[in-house]
Image (tube, rainbow, N blue to C red):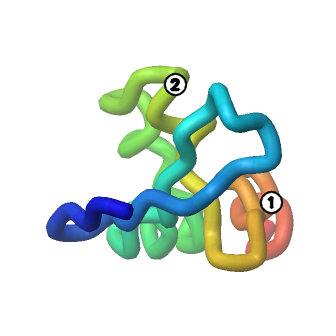
Amino acid sequence: MEESSSNQKIEAEDPNIITTSMDVDLYKAVANGNIIILKKMSEDSIRSQLTPKKNTILHIAAFFG
């Protein structure tokens, strides 16, 4: 498994999908309601971001509401 500076590849349930651990700055921004950061990201990039517990950006936004 390869690691990059802020993202680490993790295994997904579907072997055709590559997921990465969620970027810390992205997590903090979404948790604080700053969704402007999402406009700068591709849809595939947004979908590939998961927390270690497999939560998506939507989960984080809903949790911190």
Residue 2 point in image, percent of width and height: 29, 61
Direction from residue 31 to residue 55 in the image, left or right: right
Direction from residue 25 to residue 27 in the image, left or right: right
Which residue occupies 55% across, 47% down? 19
**Which residue occupies the foreground of this view, 28 or 51?**
51
Amino acid bearing label 1: His
Q: Residues within 10 Å of mark 2 (few under 14, many from 20)?
A: few
Residue 16 point in image, percent of width and height: 65, 27
Residue 29 point in image, percent of width and height: 44, 65
**Which residue occupies the foreground of this view, 2 or 8?**
2
Q: Residues within 10 Å of mark 1 (few under 14, many from 20)?
A: some
Which residue occupies 54% across, 39% down? 18
Q: Note whether 32 is above or below 38 in the view shown.
A: below
Residue 14 point in image, percent of width and height: 77, 36
Residue 48's disc number: none
Q: Circle 2 — which element?
A: helix
Q: Can you say which quadrant of the picture contains the C terminus? A: bottom right
Q: Circle 1 — which element?
A: helix
Which residue occupies 49% across, 63% down? 22
Q: Can you say which quadrant of the picture contains the N terminus? A: bottom left
Amino acid bearing label 2: Asp
Residue pointed to by mark 2? 44
Residue pointed to by mark 1? 59
Which residue occupies 52% across, 25% down? 44
Q: On the image, which quarter does residue 9 sit in?
A: bottom left
